Amino acid sequence: MISSALLTGLLLASSASARPAKRGTGEVKCPVVLSGFVPVDKTPTDFDSYATSPFNPDYIRGSEKFSQILQFPDAGSSRFDNATTKSVEVTINDKSIFQTQNGFRRAGLQIQGDTNENGPGTTGVRTLHFSVKQDPERTLNLTHEYLNVWHETSDYSANQFNFEAGTIIGKSDSDKNSFKVLNRQNTQVWSTPIDATAWQNFAITLDFVKNTLQVYYSKDDKPLKAVTSALQNDNSGGGQYQIGILKKPTGTSDVVNSGFQETGISEGQIYGGIFLEDSADGCVSL
């Protein structure tokens, strides 16, 4: 016989588990050019196939498939995720070596349709949206420099912008506990503290006609607000958007090929609400 106290507990637990998760209320108001939204019914193996993944299943990763790299934690919803979509966590470990880049530990997402040359993401005015949340079980080692989101030119010689965390190499005055946006010249244009528990929402507008960059930001389900003006930036060179983790080594001037990475790495960054929109005529989803 089940005691009344135990029955009450079971009923409360059942009620809590049946309660719908809080969903974001952000509304996408501009035409979506590239969608990195993850449908709720996607399983890990779906990310290993062009037919079923919203991302390129071959890049960017080491020997492990994305079904081994990606996690789907119960992180709630970012501002632009709703009942049909969910967040995704990019993880890295000791095996996360892309091609022969032995200095980096790296894994990342490229939205399908984002081509390296003459792609839809490098014309007109485009705004990349993404939200991030921290995983207490897979924390970043902020004594290292991390590239989390960036746009790389088609010849791989430069980035039009970097969204970074941790200790930036060669810049001892940078706050390792903050997210930082850097322009093409690697000059920091804005930063905000990393929040250990909240969703942090970002949008970066690249005007490929006027060569400007502008940053928007909010927390949890609050509307985005502009945190910079439209700043001059060299957006030439085509290329693709990179979303994930690139952890640089320490103790070297050749970060691509050498340097120190500790063993036993188990780190992750949770992403939600990934999409690129057409911001012609000043349209930005807030």
Image (spheres, rainbow, N blue to C red):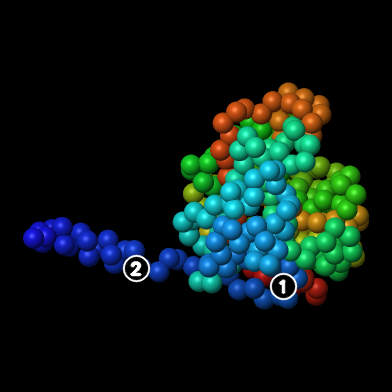
- Quick one: 170 or 250, which is closer to the camera? 250
Residue receiving disc 1:
32
- Image coordinates for residue 139, horizontal then vertical, percent: 54, 40
How many labels sit on residues?
2
Which quarter of the figure is the C terminus placed in? bottom right
- Quick one: 207 or 92, which is closer to the camera? 92
Q: Say what amino acid the circle numbered 2 marks.
A: Ala
- Quick one: 1 or 274, which is closer to the camera? 1
Residue receiving disc 2:
18
- Image coordinates for residue 189, horizontal then vertical, percent: 76, 47
* On screen, residue 2 above or below 284: above
Q: Say what amino acid the circle numbered 1 marks.
A: Val
- Locate residue 5: give its quadrant: bottom left
- Locate residue 188: give its quadrant: top right
Mark with earlier residue (2, 1): 2
- Locate residue 131: give its quadrant: bottom right
Q: Secondary structure at mark 2?
A: helix
Which quarter of the figure is the N terminus placed in? bottom left
Q: Residue at x 81, y 29 (%)?
A: 254
Q: Is residue 124 visible?
A: yes
Q: Mark 2, mark 1: which one is toward the viewer?
A: 2
